[in-house]
Image (spheres, coloured by chain):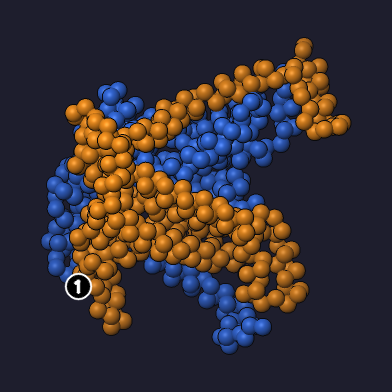
Chain colours: A orange, B blue
């Protein structure tokens, strides 16, 4: 058989590297390249047709005046110019930013707090973990209805509980000021489980000796947390922050069900506005322009996070 | 440097009390967290008058299990559930299969442009699905795919995230296993199917479950692309339910609970697996 000799021939240079590390292996390279492209083909084809193509198309469509039914007309940057005086767009952008910058830190704190709590060596940890993960496993649309019910003014469960403490709860979802906080509370409840699991996995990967060393040094729990736990957990924190910011910028389901963007435009999110513009008003070009702005924001914020990552995230100690 | 709060200091001296406080906190947090889900189920079994009362009651005065049947009668809930299984299952299967193949190429095979192509894949992780929503809709509409399964499934069956996750995992599989298989005369495809895939089952299952959950949850794409009961998913169906039935809380929440149950069951069955999968794919840290 040919297989043994040919494996030996390729394995040899790797085991005894002489000179520069980049050893060319011309004999296998051709077949390996072919194999690689065959393995890549299904994913790459789908990726090109349904992701890369549409991204480019979105850029082109944002330059058109197009209602899907009559032929598109090229109008240059007019769609982007329209954004300037469009109050609803700016309020949608503001609402999305408000939602993101409140819900992401809150979710992070809750996930981290619960992960720390569950990581204290409890015997029934797995049971609590499963139960606390339940909200994450529910359908947003479905549980959004329960939250509407919980938020009913006057006699809803939440205001009833607040009443026990002598607090006169607001008319949550129909109040300009409280509709967004209500959406945020629901969203934190829905999504903290994901971060909690990631943090638990991260916490369990921290070598126990580090804690023992900290103990020998007489470090306080807070100091141990700040100087051992937090730095070693920073890759998980980074991953969770990046994914939850991207997710929050796309908030849609709960806002559609719970407030339908109201009262007024106080909970209209960017994605809701894109959806309305494109699929209710049939202004595909204008909707695409809005989505390009959303994209730009996400790119800027994600890039900023990757820059910060260099200073704040420790991949090893 | 830190002055201890007396209560905390006392707790540290008495491990039993500390442990009890810990368990109590866990119970409390879990109870608060589960309240909305429990309420969903309780209200779902209330009578029409009770659930519509001005002052909502927490515990059903009388139980109405027939609400289950009524929810199925009001809208084709069974059909919606089946549709959701086809949609979420189809995207999860296709995504996992294509991602595993691509991830293997990125993790194990050398070819020109590998770094660049992987970089392009990674960049697309940042693209919000709303950017591609309109072009994808137009593309599917042009190909007469509106309201069809290929039109529903294909645009959401290829994402960079799956490739990224599985590549992370494959990188951690020792090369010796593959070399051993090669020595036994296995070709690359056989090595992939018989060695790599079985080792990667937890990671692949994690990806499949995550994808299934996120697609079961997906409202926007089905809302845009399906416009009849033949492809309408449960998430969209609930929306229809609400608009055609006002706020008949007991039936609405019954329908909501019914569409959530399969997901929770799946989740309970697989969660041990995928907590392990998260740890192994390196998402949890190092």
Residue A164, image quadrant: bottom left
Q: Crowdedness of circle 1 by 10 Å Cα count: few (<14), some, many (20+)?
A: some
Q: Is residue A27 at all visible to an observer of this figure? A: yes
Residue B83, image quadrant: top left
Q: In front: B39, or A53? A: A53
Query: Which residue is drawn at the image coordinates 49% and 24% (left, top)?
Result: A42
- For label 1, the residue is A154
Residue A258: percent from the left, percent from the top? 25, 57
Task: Tell which residue pokes out farthest to the top in this image.
Answer: A1
| Above-or-below relation of A280 to A107 | above
Protein chain holding label 1: A
Q: Is residue B63 at all visible to an observer of this figure? A: no
Q: How many marks?
A: 1
Query: Which residue is drawn at the image coordinates 56% and 20% (left, top)?
Result: A38
Q: Secondary structure at mark 1?
A: loop
| Above-or-below relation of B5 to A295 | below
Q: Is residue A243 left or right of residue A166?
A: right
Residue B75: percent from the left, percent from the top? 18, 42
Report the quarter where the N terminus of chain B lies.
Answer: bottom right
Residue B28, image quadrant: bottom left
| Above-or-below relation of A39 to A312 | above
Residue B106: percent from the left, percent from the top? 61, 32
Query: Which residue is drawn at the image coordinates 48% and 68% (left, top)?
Result: B26
Query: Which residue is drawn at the image coordinates 34% and 49% (left, top)?
Result: A139
Residue B208: percent from the left, percent from the top? 47, 38
Q: In front: B212, or A45? A: A45
């Amino acid at each position: 058989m040919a297989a043994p000799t040919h494996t030996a021939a390729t394995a040899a240079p790797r085991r005894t590297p002489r000179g520069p590390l980049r050893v060319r292996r011309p004999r296998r390279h051709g077949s390996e390249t072919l194999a690689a492209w065959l393995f890549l083909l299904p994913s790459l084809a789908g990726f090109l047709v349904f992701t890369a193509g549409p991204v480019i198309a979105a850029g082109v469509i944002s330059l058109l005046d197009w209602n899907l039914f009559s032929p598109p007309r090229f109008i240059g940057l007019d769609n982007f110019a329209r954004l300037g005086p469009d109050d609803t767009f700016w309020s949608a952008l503001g609402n999305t930013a408000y939602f993101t910058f409140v819900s992401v830190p809150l979710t992070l704190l809750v996930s981290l707090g619960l992960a720390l709590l569950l990581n204290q060596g409890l015997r029934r940890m797995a049971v609590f973990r499963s139960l606390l993960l339940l909200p994450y496993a529910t359908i947003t649309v479905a549980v959004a209805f329960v939250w509407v019910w919980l938020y009913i003014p006057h006699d809803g469960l939440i205001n009833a509980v607040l009443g026990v403490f002598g607090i006169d709860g607001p008319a949550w979802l129909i109040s300009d000021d409280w509709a967004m906080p209500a959406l945020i509370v629901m969203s934190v409840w829905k999504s903290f489980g994901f971060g909690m699991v990631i943090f638990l996995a991260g916490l369990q990967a921290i070598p126990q000796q580090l804690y023992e060393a900290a103990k020998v040094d007489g470090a306080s729990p807070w100091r141990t947390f700040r100087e051992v736990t937090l730095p070693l957990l920073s890759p998980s924190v980074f991953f969770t922050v990046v994914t939850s910011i991207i997710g929050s910028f796309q908030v849609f389901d709960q806002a559609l069900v719970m407030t339908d963007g109201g009262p007024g435009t106080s909970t209209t999110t960017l994605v809701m506005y894109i959806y309305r513009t494109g699929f209710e008003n049939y202004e595909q070009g204008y909707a695409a322009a809005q989505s390009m702005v959303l994209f730009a924001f996400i790119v800027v914020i994600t890039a900023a996070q990757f820059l910060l990552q260099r200073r704040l995230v420790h991949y090893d100690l | 440097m830190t002055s201890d709060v007396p209560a905390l200091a006392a707790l540290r001296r008495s491990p039993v009390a500390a442990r009890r406080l810990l368990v109590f906190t866990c119970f409390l947090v879990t109870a608060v967290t589960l309240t909305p889900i429990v309420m969903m189920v309780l209200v779902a079994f209330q009578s029409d008058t009770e659930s519509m009362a001005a002052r909502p009651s927490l515990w059903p005065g009388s139980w109405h299990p027939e609400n289950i049947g009524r929810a199925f009668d009001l809208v084709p809930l069974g059909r919606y559930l089946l549709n959701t299984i086809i949609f979420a299952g189809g995207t999860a299967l296709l995504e996992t299969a294509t991602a595993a193949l691509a991830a293997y190429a990125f993790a194990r095979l050398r070819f020109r442009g590998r770094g660049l192509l992987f970089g392009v894949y990674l960049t697309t992780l940042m693209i919000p699905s709303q950017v591609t929503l309109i072009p994808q809709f137009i593309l599917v509409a042009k190909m007469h795919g509106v309201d069809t399964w290929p039109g529903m499934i294909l645009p959401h069956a290829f994402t960079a995230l799956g490739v990224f996750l599985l590549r992370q995992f494959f990188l951690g599989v020792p090369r010796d296993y593959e070399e051993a298989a090669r020595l036994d005369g296995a070709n690359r495809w056989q090595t992939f199917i018989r060695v790599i895939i079985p080792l990667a089952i937890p990671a692949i299952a994690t990806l499949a479950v995550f994808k299934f959950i996120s697609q079961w949850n997906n409202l926007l794409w089905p809302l845009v692309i399906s416009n009849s009961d033949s492809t309408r998913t449960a998430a969209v169906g609930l929306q229809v339910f609400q608009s055609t039935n006002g706020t008949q809380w007991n039936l609405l929440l019954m329908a909501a609970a019914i569409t959530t149950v399969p997901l929770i069951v799946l989740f309970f069955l697989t969660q041990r697996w995928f907590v392990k999968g998260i740890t192994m794919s390196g998402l949890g840290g190092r």
